[in-house]
Image: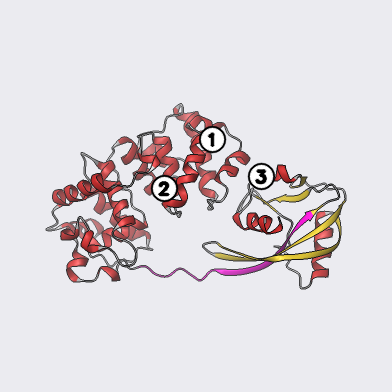
Amino acid sequence: MNVKENVQQILDHFHIEQFQHDLIQWFQAEKRDLPWRKEKDPYKIWVSEVMLQQTRVDTVIPYFYQFIEKFPTLDALADAEEEEVLKVWEGLGYYSRIRHLHAAVKEVKEKYGGRVPASKEQFSSLKGVGPYTTGAVLSIAYDIPEPAVDGNVMRVLSRIFYITDDIAKGSTRKKFEQIVSHIISHTNPSDFNQALMELGALICTPKNPSCLLCPVQRHCRAFAEGVEKQLPVKTKAKAPKHVAFRAIVLVNEDGNILIEKRPSSGLLANLWQFPNDEHAPTSNEQAFIKEISERYHVVLRSIQRIGTFEHVFSHIVWHIEAYKGNALELQIDDETNKWVTVDELNQYAFPVIYQKIWQAYE
C-alpha cells in the first residue's frame, strides 16, 4: 500500500469538519497571549518560529522582545553585522538557526524588496527554511493552507489517528504532512495550525496528557483504545559523546582579558571564548600552562582553578575545567585573538558555558 492509499485509509470515518470546528473553537477561547500573535507580520512570525525550534516558549518570549526591539524590520536585520546579531541571540543556542535566518533575510531584501514571499516555492528555497517553517509562516501570516508539522504536531496526530510509525523517520513526517494537508481548514489555516501546536503544548503533552480536558478527545483513537501514553513511537537517539578540556580567563598587566574567536564553521561558529586546550587536552597543570603560553603567545607562570562546568549539546557533552591566571602579554599575530577590557567583553557573543565561567570568575 502506498502512502497516499494509507493516508486515505487513516482518514476513513474521520469527521474532518467537526474536528476542525472543535479544535479551532478551543484555540480561539484558550490560546495563550504570545507577542508574535499580536499582528500578522510575516517577518516577526518567522523570527518567532526560528526561535521556537528546540526552545521553550517561556525562554523565547524575552528574547523575542529584545530581538524585535533591536531589529524591528526585516531590512534592519538584513543590514546588521553578524557580530551584532549573534550578541542579541546570545544564550538561545543552536546558533546555526540565526545564521541561516540572517542569510535568508538578506536574500529576501535583495530578491523580493524586503517582503517575505508568500510563495511556497520561493519561501522554502531560502537558507535554513524547511517544510515546517514554510508551513508555519505561510499559514499563520498569509492564511495559506500549508501543513506545519513538527515533533509537537506529530505527537498529537499519532494519538488522534493511532499511528505507530516511528516519528524519528523522515517518511513518517511526510505521512503526517499529507494527513494535515487533507484535514487543515482552508477557511482558517492560521488558527488550525496554531491550534495543533497549542494542543501539543498545553493538553496533549509528552507525558501524562490531559485527555479529560482535550477539546478533540471524541476524535482521538488512541484515547478510545487507552493507549495515548504509549504514543508517539520514537527510536532513541545515540548517547552523546563526552569531551573534557580546560579553559582559562587570562588577565594582562592592564587588566584586559584575552578572548578568542571560534572557527567560522562547525560547533558554535564565530562565537567568542576564553583560551582553552579543546583540541589538545593535557594531563597536568604544568603541561596546560606550557600549552596555553605557547599557543596564545603569553608568559603564564601560575594558574588558579575556578570550577568545573558542563554544557550539553544534542550530540556532545562538554566538561570544562576552568582556571584564571595572570599573563604577561607577548606579540599576538592572530586576528582571532584579542585583548579586551571588561566593558568591551560585553559586546562579544559567548556560548552559555563561557558566560558561566566568566560569572564564576567575577
Q: Does label 2 or label 3 sit earlier along the sequence?
A: 2
- Amino acid found under the numbered disc labelled 1: Lys
User: What segment carries the magenta color?
Assistant: 234-250
Q: Secondary structure at mark 3?
A: loop
Within 10 Å of the Cα at label 1, are there few (<14), some (14-19), or many (20+) other Cα atoms?
Answer: some
Residue in the image at 43% along x and 54% along y: 56
Circle 1 is placed at which residue position? Answer: 70
Q: Look at the image and say whether residue 278 sits in the magenta stretch.
A: no
Circle 1/circle 2 CB separation < 8 Å: no
- Number of the front mark, 2 or 3: 3
| Rendering coords of residue 350 (x, y %) | 64, 50
Which secondary structure, mark 2? loop
Residue 41 found in image quarter: top left
Is 85 drawn above or below residue 319 in the view shown? above
Residue at the spot x=84%, y=54% of the render?
Answer: 297
Say which quadrant the C terminus sits in.
Answer: bottom right
Direction top: furthest residue: 113
* 177 left or right of 321 in image: left
Whole-percent x and y of residue 348? 66, 44
Residue 200 visible in the displayed image: yes
Q: CA distance from mark 2 to mark 3?
A: 30 Å
Pointer 2 residue: 130
Left or right side of 145 for 249: right
- Above or below for 355 versus 68: below
Q: Which residue is mark 3?
A: 348
How packed is label 3: few (under 14 Cα within 10 Å), some, or many (20 or more)?
some
Give percent across and percent down for residue 107: 50, 34
Identity of the amino acid at label 3? Tyr
Q: Secondary structure at mark 1?
A: helix
On residue 86, the disc is none
Residue neighbourhood size for the residue with mark 2, other residues' Cα within 10 Å, grouped as few (<14), some (14–19), many (≥20): few
Tags 1 and 3 touching, CB below 8 Å: no
